[in-house]
Amino acid sequence: MKNNFKENKNNFKQPLLKTPFYEMFSKEMTQGYWYDWSGYKAASIVQDQELEYFAIRSTASLFDISPLIKYRITGPDTEDFLNKLTIRNVGQQKNNTVQYTIWCDDEGNVLDDGTLFKFNNTSFRLCCQERHLPWFIDTSSGFNVEILEETNLIAGLSIQGPTSAAVLINAGYQSIDQLKPFEMIKVTDDILISRTGFTGDLGYEIFLPNKLSTAVWNNLWKAGEDLGIRAIGFNALNIARIETGFIIANSDFITSEHAVRNNRAKKPDEIGMSWMVDMTKQYFNGKAAIQKARENNENKFIFVALEIDGKEPADGAIIYHNKDLEVGIITAATWSPTAKKSIALATLKLPYGQKIKSNLWVEIYVLRELEYFKMMKKAFIVKAPFVKLSRRNLTPPLRK
Amino acid sequence: MTQKFDAIIIGAGHNGLVSACYLQKAGLNVLVLEKNDWIGGAAVSRELTPNILYSNCSYVCSLFRPEIMRDLELPKHGLQIIGIEGGTVFTKNGDYLASYRNYHSKRREMARFSNKDSEAYERYSRDVTRQCRFIQPLLMRTAPDPASFKLKDISEIFYLIKKFNELTPNQMAETIRFWTMSISDYLDEYFENDVIKASLAVSGIIGTALGPMSPGTAYVLLHHYMGEVDGSIGSWGYARGGMGAITQALSSSFKSLGGTIITESEVTNVLVNNNSAKGVALKNGNEYYSSTIISNADVKRTFLKLVNEKNLPKKFINKVKNFKIRGSSGKVNIGLDSMPEFPAVPKGDPCLKGDIHFTDSIERMERAYDDWKNGTWSKDPFLDMMIPTTTDPTMAPPGKHFMSCFVQYCPPKVYGNDWTEANKEAFGETVVKQIEEYSPSFREKIIHMEIRTPKELENEVGLTEGNIFQGELTFDQLLFNRPIPGYAQYRSPVSGLYICGSSTHPGGGVMGAPGRNAAIEILRDLKKPTKHARSAYEVI
Amino acid sequence: MQEVPMKSYDVIIVGAGHNGMAAAVKLSKSGRKVLLLESSSKPGGMAVSNEIFKGYNTATLPHLINHLSSKVIKELDLFDHGLEIKNKIIPSISIDQNHNHVFLNGEYGSNVEGINSEDNHSWLKLRKRLFNQANLLKRFISNTPINQENISFLGKLKFIKAGLDLRLQGKEEFQEFFRMILMCVADVLEEEIESDLLSGIVSFDSTLGIRLGPRSPTSLMGLLYRFSGEFNGQQGVQIFPVGGMEQLIKSFYASVESSGVTTLFSQTVKNFIIKDGKIDGVITKEGNEYKSRIVLSSVSPILTFLELIGTKRLDTGFIRELKSLRYHGNVSKLNLALDRIPVFEGLDENQLSSRIVYAPSIEHVEKNFNPSKYQELPTDPNFELVFPNRFDQSLAPNGAAIASIIIQNTPYNLKNGWEKSREKLQNDVLSRLESFSPGIKKSILASQFLSPQDIENSFNVPGGHWHHSELQIDRMYSLRPVFKCSNYKTPLSGLYICGSGTHPGGGINGNSGINAAKQIIKDINN
């Protein structure tokens, strides 16, 4: 195991590290809203949240994804190892594609979700929110694999929006023209581009060695000058991801190694990921527990998408049945500028959300000039995504 | 001179003063008698060399219950606890493992030693947090007597069963294992790196006569983790003005409620008549009378020295004799001319503002314990060293420092003989030498040094064998077993005689809970209100 | 010797140790078609005997019985299958360099010679209390522990019932139980006993076979566990069967044969066949495949899970738990063939029919334990010695002797390695023996030494631990081997485990085999 932190003794001086794109973002940054993403400084807002959102939905946005935790997994048993680790079938994943996936503990509770990049059956990259080295190493017992955390070796940039393909082609990465969603391609020896993203829009993610960060940034910035390119922060991205119904670990669900209290850890079925569980696989970690919970109806929660009356965002609100019985909580909510609705992602206690789907209410408190407006708003269970864009899947992609 | 009080407390330690405050607040006229010319017991700040205040016994605070601080308005009486910034373990090979308040700095520092361990720490702290959440609510409750058929005891046992039942089956299994394991085995289940394990094992041994490989030390770890500073569970802090600030605030609170403290009044005898406490007799010949006597002294000192044997059942006396109070630690307190340099650490590193250790493996800790079992002080001792003046400059003139070295292991007798001056010097030298290895110019900076072996701790503070917890924290002496089965509710065979020190549940550390719990039991016996003692803050 | 085996069975049992055999009989009697597979050429597992020199037969490892469960004797009709016990209670001697030996006669020292009357009084009082406490634990020892399936109210009722029963014995006993249960044996002894030799042997017996010293908290449990053993209503006794330990195993195997179990020797299970997440049989190294929907493994949990199933097929949390098992042994065995009957100063020849323990004081035992913490050997090891042919003369030629010696605190991993240390350890033990019995060294015709590493290799027990894994309180009862498997079931559907690694643990008792068989029968019937 390579230890990437060995040399730095001055850890007290720099609690938050700078990503390779830090300088570029700070140049654009007019207000200085940084937040802590896995120990890195990441932008919440670069200049203006609304304008950044519209860059995602109408032009091209650049978001720094370098803080994603990245593992490189290689070796002859890599595919078998990943088939034990994750709940989807890695054997069926084609080379040079990306799979959204989940891994669970023995009780079938979700440890994290992430994206799995398959180069070939002996080489993968796994990107996720939390660190999992102990779990991966302990899971790899008996498998001939090598696991390297490469978070601080590989920089990442997400370019999303209708003109994102045009920007990339302008920048000289013509080969992305043939990329279908969830496919990836090496545009140079060092630069990998995948057609993935967290926005539900046309978009790409670029992975590159740290040393190329300035060159790639300058290249894209220049190529995007006339295509409305804009550096964005997480706040804008968050609106787009809620519109698409994407979840975030330790925000929309608690990862099982962080859950101190009982009943906080959740199974894939309880966070809306039933479709992902591949029960035809011979074995994977947690399979027996997930199967048992299904057979004995032991799942306690369901994850739903809600449309809510009115226009006030309902973050963290309690959900009631018939206005009096608490049945759940909203984990993410926003006004959707594209759908023109108040939307939310929520966890409901069964049977609400499954057998009982109507008569749901959301209690929203809005503070205005030191007085609360308390509202009970009707909520409707809908099917995510709230915003469905045909350009997301078109190949070759739109160029404008 | 004779005078009558509603209650007399023997010893002005923190638990005695906490009890005194709660009783006085309930309308009793309370007298506290202290043998020394200073108050505070083991929570003191003393000017042992001009202008430098020494926390010469206890030296950090975390366990003191926030509910008590609030009930007794201690902040109003000058108490302030400041969180500690860091900590470090120096390694033999010239490196160091620092610990910081910031999550990422701390994790990356651990990753220098083991990337895997730096992440395993997440799961470890989750599991220890679970144990803390289970134990915390029990601290501020009188332990039930499982042998009793009284309604109160039975309902309290049901409370414990209910608490236990709230755990999932797996957590129950984990909890039972945790209570019976050694800290070394426990850490092995999470970590691979020796230095990281050694840094975490510290809390499993401090104050006990056990090594990190002894079963039961995982619980001791919990005992050091279940405290808090302003809601941050497991954090430790300095009392501004030294540990004496805690007892000074208590004493000020007590006096403002109308209570009386008399110092230089050593109690030699508890007066008993007809199996009831009547008062106390002092060394100076004075007697004070009250039908409620509360001893802040440990259980052995109280029942083997202060109460005449004939007033106690023989069986009880035997059990008191069998109570394990083992001196296992010493203290070297040093006044420094300037801040010592530790060349291994970068300039400005806050890790020197907290606990500094030089024991970089569990094996070294355990070997230090072997020396103690052998009857002598550790030749390669474990030091828990702190320089509080780095955080609280009020304790010394600018630039000068007070350094507290808690030393383990140090026996109450050397190979069965009393400590000699030469032994004491040699013990101090062992400590200075160890520090010198990591701070070459250290010796030159020493202005004054106080060496305290268990003998001094016993003679000056009154702690039997110099044990800082007034009794080992092993399962046979916890909860309803502390100090003695059947007498775990602060009462004694003599009606009206109570104990309120760390010998009682929930045990040692500057916690105040034993004093508060004892006061509640006393007020119940006296049929007085107890509403002014708030119940424990809920753990959510 | 055996008919051509059918390839498909109701239950396959891996390992013909005493637990495997007990389970085989129980299952076979319930009408199941049982196949018992053993990797060596004879039954007995770690309880086998061998001929160390022509005409000298001795138990390779354990040389006495102290826990054989009456339940097992009954289930297997051992007395009808050749088990015979004549010399029922074997006394113990704590030997002293100055020949002032202490003799523990009767049921673990119901009558002690060599201590003063005050000690005698205190000892009898303490012994009574400990026996009483052991009796309370006994009801938990022979049966299946509380487990995931019955942890609810009904499971806990057992504890509440035990608590009430204890309380009815009086407040004092109740309180002392909860005070003492997790104490170290040294503290308990020092509260009551003055004699170093008596305290020494009791300390030794409390910690024998586990990695604790007498000053380690919870070490009293080892003694209580020993006291929970009984034979014919006699508590805490050691016994020796006619014909030696070999005869005990023979009676087990005779019972197996008469119950219609198919036993195959020299069949080493290589791995399990797993189909649709369930067990479907076993494959042997010899290339045979045997089908069964139920497999009961009596080999060590580490071997069963980490090797026979393999970590690839086990959930990671479970692997973590298994890897946390402390399965490295701490005991070595030395067997000697002597050309004459040795002479011990202060003992007459009859008194050699005892268990002789060298553990002169608590301090001595504790100091012996210290180096083992750091993978080092003690310089003056404590040991237990018996002369098996004193109990049954047929085991050695007339006028000769076998010495069977268990050496404590000899860790599996040594910093210096066993190759460099084995000679020295044997010499240290022999020198100490020589000091008690001058000339004994010269009378040695042959010797057999097994370190924990040798035990691992000879008996296929990873770590060479006599109990398969540490028998300390954090791994007892429901926590043995791990909580998930405390009802002998495993996360792999159809696979069950028994053996010393499961509740109630070590010693030759057979309870776990019976309990596991019961669980299987219950599950089949459901």
Image (tube, rainbow, N blue to C red):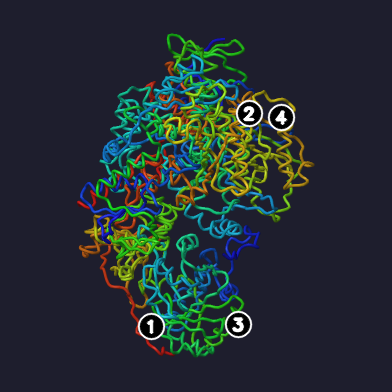
Q: Secondary structure at mark 1?
A: helix
Residue located 45% across and 33% down the image: C389
> Label 1 crowding class (10 Å Cα cut-off): few <14, some 14-19, many 20+?
many
Residue B535 visible at all: yes
Q: Do marks 3 and 4 both belong to one polypeptide chain? A: no
Residue located 54% across and 90% down the image: A172
Residue located 55% across and 21% down the image: C346
Alpha carbon separation for disc pair 2 and 3: 67 Å
Q: Is residue C30 left or right of residue A85?
A: left
* Residue pointed to by mark 1: A392
Residue A347 visible at all: no
Placement of A13 over or under B207, stated as above or below: below
Q: Secondary structure at mark 2?
A: helix
Q: Do marks 4 and 2 both belong to one polypeptide chain? A: yes
User: Which quarter of the picture shows residue C171?
Assistant: top left
* Residue pointed to by mark 2: B454
Placement of B434 over or under B328, stated as above or below: below
Name the amino acid type tagged 4.
Lys
Name the amino acid type tagged 2.
Pro
Q: Is residue B15 left or right of residue C503?
A: right
Q: Position of residue A90 (x, y in %)?
A: 39, 73
Q: Secondary structure at mark 4?
A: helix
Q: Chain of mark 4?
A: B
Q: Is residue C238 left or right of residue B281?
A: left
Q: Do marks 1 and 3 both belong to one polypeptide chain? A: yes
Alpha carbon separation for disc pair 1 and 3: 27 Å
Q: Are marks 1 and 3 in contact (CB under 8 Å)?
A: no
Q: Are marks 4 and 2 in contact (CB under 8 Å)?
A: no
